[in-house]
Image (spheres, helix red, strand yellow):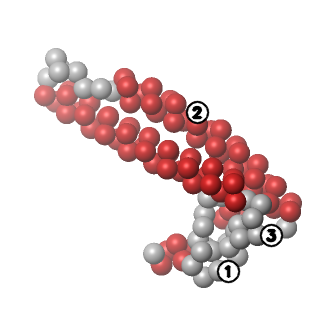
Amino acid sequence: MEETNKNIIKEQIITDIKSLKKQIEMLKDKAALTAPDCSRCDLERSEALLDAEIMNKILNESIARLARLEYALSQVDSPDFGICIECENDIPVERLKIRPESVRCVACENAK
């Protein structure tokens, strides 16, 4: 991969990490606010529990993506960065610009 594309992808990773960290903090704050209140009626309590469950799922997925992005940032200068771990072909630069944490090409990802 040429250096210009690596730099673009590295900047994208850094931007995504900053954005995701802000999102995670916001989700943590919201998750704390959606704790079910025992004094609510059954329907309100069920809705609050569902909201909390959804919020925690989004939070967990965001934390997992943050870890993948941080790993991608640590690997972006490696000669193996941008090579599919399945078929060992180059992952298209356009895919890496959108999902810089990708370790598989689209074909291999869809074949999983």
Q: At 13% across and 28% down in the image, what residue appears?
A: 42
Q: Quadrant of residue 104?
A: bottom right
User: Mark 2 is on which residue type?
Assistant: Lys
Q: Which sits in the foreground, 89 or 40?
A: 89
Residue 56 percent across, percent down from the top left: 37, 39
| Residue, disc 2 | 22
Horizontal and vertical percent for residue 82? 70, 68
Q: Quadrant of the N terminus?
A: bottom right
Query: Could you tell me which secondary element the residue under label 2 belongs to?
Result: helix
Whether residue 60 appears in this view of the structure is yes
User: Of helix, strand and loop, which one carries label 3?
Assistant: loop
Q: Quadrant of residue 38?
A: top left
User: Considering only vertical position in the picture, is 100 above or below 36?
Assistant: below
Q: At label 1, which amino acid type do we have?
A: Asn
Residue placed at 75% from the left, 53% from the top? 10
Q: Is residue 97 visible to the viewer in this orientation of the structure?
A: no
Q: What residue sits right under mark 1 in the picture? A: 89
What is the three-letter code of the residue carrying label 3?
Met
Tag 3 residue: 1
The residue at the point 60 percent across, 67 percent down is 103
Q: Say if 19 sits above or below 48 in the image.
A: below
